[in-house]
Amino acid sequence: MKRIIIDTNFLIIPYKFRVDIFSEFSRICDFNYKLFIFEESINELEKIMQNQRGINKKAAQFALKLIKLKNIGIIKSNEKDVDGLILNDANEDDIIATQDIKLKQELLRKGVSVIMLRQKKYLQLAERKLYK
């Protein structure tokens, strides 16, 4: 079973762009997988709720509800930088769902597959073998 690790910015997509990322995961992943998020991503969403207003605040609230509703696994960590956690923790068997361009490039270079939002409508899986 593969691990799909969701970056903080990816959990904002359902609210901001009205894309059901969970049905999209099912559409593009024809293998068994389990969804995970780093504990620090939850902290980032809570900070957004406290410090921002409008759509960002509502998107963060919605994202926190989705984590519970979809029973997303939480990976404990001591580090505060989610991108650093993802880069250090991810291996070739993992898939990372992120919108961070720099992180995507580094992961693909490292041999880790990435899921990204395309045209603000659907998800696409960029497999590591395409970028070797």
Image (cartoon, rainbow, N blue to C red):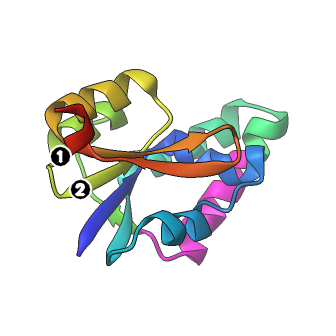
Give the numbered dot on residue 116. Answer: none
Image check: 118 left or right of 39?
Answer: right
Instruction: Depth check: give the residue in front, 82 or 46.
Output: 82
Image check: 117 left or right of 72?
Answer: right
Residue 81 appears in view = no
Q: Secondary structure at mark 1?
A: helix
Q: Main secondary structure of the magenta part?
A: helix
On the image, numbered disc 2 is attached to which residue? Answer: 94
Whether the magenta-drawn stretch holds residue 95 is answered as no
Magenta stretch: give its range: 59-72
Q: Is residue 109 above or below residue 22?
A: above
Q: Secondary structure at mark 2?
A: strand
What x and y, as percent, mark residue 117?
Answer: 57, 43
- The answer for how far apart the CA atoms under marks 2 and 1 are is 9 Å
On the image, numbered disc 1 is attached to which residue? Answer: 89
Query: Residue shown at 60%/70% (left/top)?
Result: 23
Amino acid type, mark 1: Asp
Amino acid type, mark 2: Asp
Residue 42 appears in view = yes
